[in-house]
Image: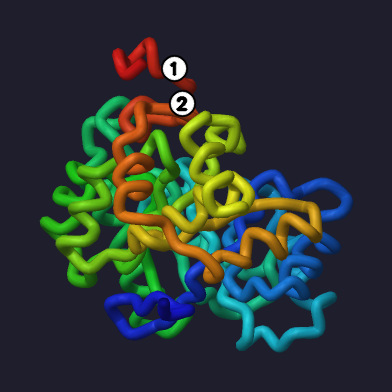
Amino acid sequence: MNLTYTLSNGLELPRVGYGTYQVSDGRGAEVVAQALTAGYRLLDTASFYDNEEAVGEGIRRSGLPRSEVLLTSKAWRTELGHSEVLSAFEASCRRLGTDYLDLYLLHWPCVAAQRPDWRAVNAQSWQALEELYRAGRVRAIGVSNYLPEHLDALLETAEILPMVNQIEYHPGWTQPETVNWCRAHGVLVEAWSPMGRRRVLRHPLVERIAARHQVSPARVCLRFALEQGVLPLPKSSDAARMAENLALFSFSLSEEERDWLETMPPAGWSGEDPNRPGRKYTLEELGLS
């Protein structure tokens, strides 16, 4: 198995990245430096995470040159719009202590529940990313939490196709319609919460497959993402787990096991619905239990 994914513009990303959501306490810089020491080279942050300063400091503490670290950030819902995204990008770069990003994403789509002109807002936001990309300020651009209807609307005006779509993805929540759309258009899917916020790790099916391979349930979830062509972004502040989450190439899942995980009943969902911002839902509320 290759150790990198190649984006549509030729940029190579490691097959596993490090998610920094909630890595924002006093140990943030230390944890990020530790992740880089463990071997991670793709870091994922966002303005909303309120930890960009710590992520930038962690890179500097690691001693690695900036060119060896692939750095992602994202523009939040309140930062959408052409000028707003450009300002958000500059602010993220200042906090991170860098003059460029390797990957910049729109964190959530603007949707009809928020504004009747949601299509125009998303189009203007994407135009700003295209400008940053053409100017060489960012090496790749993409979106996060975009469903097919948001992507189809974006393509009506986009001159450059998104290179990445970062979505919630794990056994029990694989979003096949969105993943299939991305595969058909050459868009790499990245997985946030690839272990279902650790709730999926206690699922009997995941535990059974882990026992078969004598690996942890976490490694089963991450390996599943890789074998589906998805780039997982695990998060851990523990050095041993950081290393374990990178050790994914010593085993593989059978076709039967992949099918079991792909068709597993809904489980571990965060409750975040892109079309219904502002609150979290349960599977029962959406009739998915």
Q: Residue at x 42, y 62 (%)?
A: 226
Examine the rendered structure and indicate whether residue 265 appears above or below residue 102. Answer: above
Q: Quadrant of residue 22?
A: top right
Examine the rendered structure and indicate whether residue 9 appears above or below residue 261. Answer: below
Examine the rendered structure and indicate whether residue 29 appears above or below residue 49. Answer: below
What secondary structure is marked by label 1? loop
In the displayed structure, does residue 6 sit left or right of residue 68? left
Residue 73: image location, x then y, percent: 54, 61
Residue 112: image location, x then y, percent: 25, 30
For marks 1 and 2, give the CA distance. Answer: 6 Å
Look at mark 2 in the image and give the residue it sits on: 271
Residue 199: image location, x then y, percent: 58, 31
Q: Residue at x 63, y 59 (%)?
A: 245
Crowding at mark 1 (Cα within 10 Å: few <14, some 14-19, many 20+): few
Amino acid type shown at disc 2: Gly
Asked if one can make out residue 85 in the rendered structure from this viewpoint, the answer is yes
Q: Is the N terminus in the top left, top right, bottom left or bottom right quadrant?
A: bottom left
Q: Are marks 1 and 2 in contact (CB under 8 Å)?
A: yes
Residue 269: image location, x then y, percent: 46, 30
Please state which of residues 223 and 130 is positioned toward the viewer in this rendering.
223
In the displayed structure, does residue 189 sit left or right of residue 49? left
Q: Is the C terminus in the top left, top right, bottom left or bottom right quadrant?
A: top left
Residue at the far left: name it: 156
Q: Quadrant of residue 197?
A: top right
Asked if one can make out residue 105 in the rendered structure from this viewpoint, the answer is no
Look at mark 1 in the image and give the residue it sits on: 282
In the displayed structure, does residue 99 sit left or right of residue 240? left
Crowding at mark 2 (Cα within 10 Å: few <14, some 14-19, many 20+): some
What secondary structure is marked by label 2? loop
